[in-house]
Amino acid sequence: MHFCGLFAALTFVSSPLLAQSIEGTSYMLPKNGMRFTVKVEKTQYKPGEFSPYAERFMREKVSQQPSTTYRIIGIEMDQTAVPDTSKQFKLTVDKKYTIDKVSLTHDGQLLAINTDAKQPTLPVRVFKPAPKPAPLDPSAFMTEDILSAGSTAKQAELTAKEIYDIRDSRNSLSRGDADNLPKDGAQLKLMYENMNRQEAALTQLFEGTTVKDTTWTQLSFVPVKEGKSVLFRFSKYYGLVSCDDLSGEPYFITITDEHTAKDPMADAATEKKKEDKNDIGLRSVLPSKIKAVLTTGGKTVATYEMNAAQFGFVQSLSGDLFGKKQSAQIVFDPLTGSVRSIKDIEMK
């Protein structure tokens, strides 16, 4: 952070956090929030047509009831900034001070004085689903005997026999005992793939099918005080649910202020502050670092740290910065409203 030789121009005054009744440029300081991207995997199970016969013919126990379940596979956090309407000010711009440019965000937060500044942007998190393979059609791999069988039980029995035959043929092929061995590696690979596909299609008649989908949901949270609160609730059977829906287990967020910012008025009791005659309504933030801990079921899911404007203090920047002979360019942090850099300008 580059301040050049202008520390003396940063003065602290005791002033209300309200818009001043003088003409000028209105702006607001920010308060900080957290945008959570919750990644949830949805799993849908559909029992197979022959599932009642799976234990009898395939020696497997499978569920005969359809089901839908959810699980969280990831949580990411991005820091956000929104205007703090309780910290609104007006910047005096007249001939006495060399301020010819004031840059604001689209929603009215102060970005820069006497220089350009880019509009802040949040990281873009876009979900790109992976392409899904085409579903297998078991009927395309059924033999004539299976299709013409007179009962479902008989179809299941013949299908199980076909599955075992495919497995035996694949084992013979891997041992080199097959009657028609492939001529090269490419043909061997193709034969394996065909056998695997046939087995998978017929096996799903007993084991059923499982389809997985991933969804991203974004949640916003703006901490205003220390303490513990419910960020969201999550159910294995319903996914993300509202905070008052007791079907879901609560995910708590605990905010702790680490008090890294010093109150600029802390010395007021021992040293009487003089009123700044060059108070032009220019304010910035001394943010404090906070810790956010996400927990569920007594276990820590994630820990985040960030600077938060609303837990810090407001400081005043004196109009002495913008004299006739020497002025300044100031850039503010678009997230926290703190001073990012101050640079001298020699006036001609």
Image (spheres, rainbow, N blue to C red):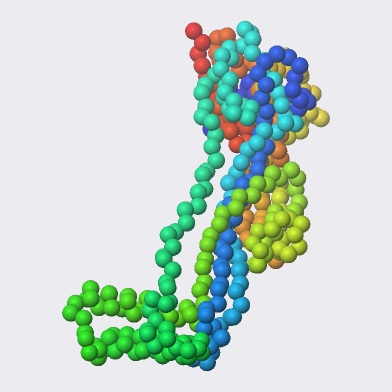
Whether residue 251 is visible here, answered yes or no, is: no
In screen coordinates, is 109 left or right of 130? Answer: right
Q: How many marks?
A: 0
Whether residue 222 is visible here, answered yes or no, is: yes
Where residue 286 sits in the image (x, y, percent)? 66, 34
- Please give the name of the residue rendered at 65% of the width and 36% of the height, measured from the top-left corner: 82
Q: Is residue 247 above or below residue 314?
A: below
- 146, 168: nearer the viewer: 146
Q: Is residue 178 above or below residue 11?
A: below
Q: Is residue 334 above or below residue 245?
A: above
In screen coordinates, is 215 left or right of 137? Answer: right
Where residue 257 sits in the image (x, y, percent)? 71, 46
Where residue 77 sits in the image (x, y, percent)? 59, 50
- Please give the name of the residue rendered at 65% of the width and 59% of the height, measured from the top-left corner: 240
- 320, 220: nearer the viewer: 220
Q: Is residue 29 above or below residue 321?
A: below
Where residue 149 sits in the image (x, y, percent)? 45, 88
In screen coordinates, is 192 left or right of 342? Answer: left
Q: Quadrant of residue 302?
A: bottom right
Q: Quadrant of residue 6?
A: top right
Q: Quadrant of residue 51?
A: bottom right
- Please give the name of the residue rendered at 79% of the width and 23% of the height, measured from the top-left corner: 272
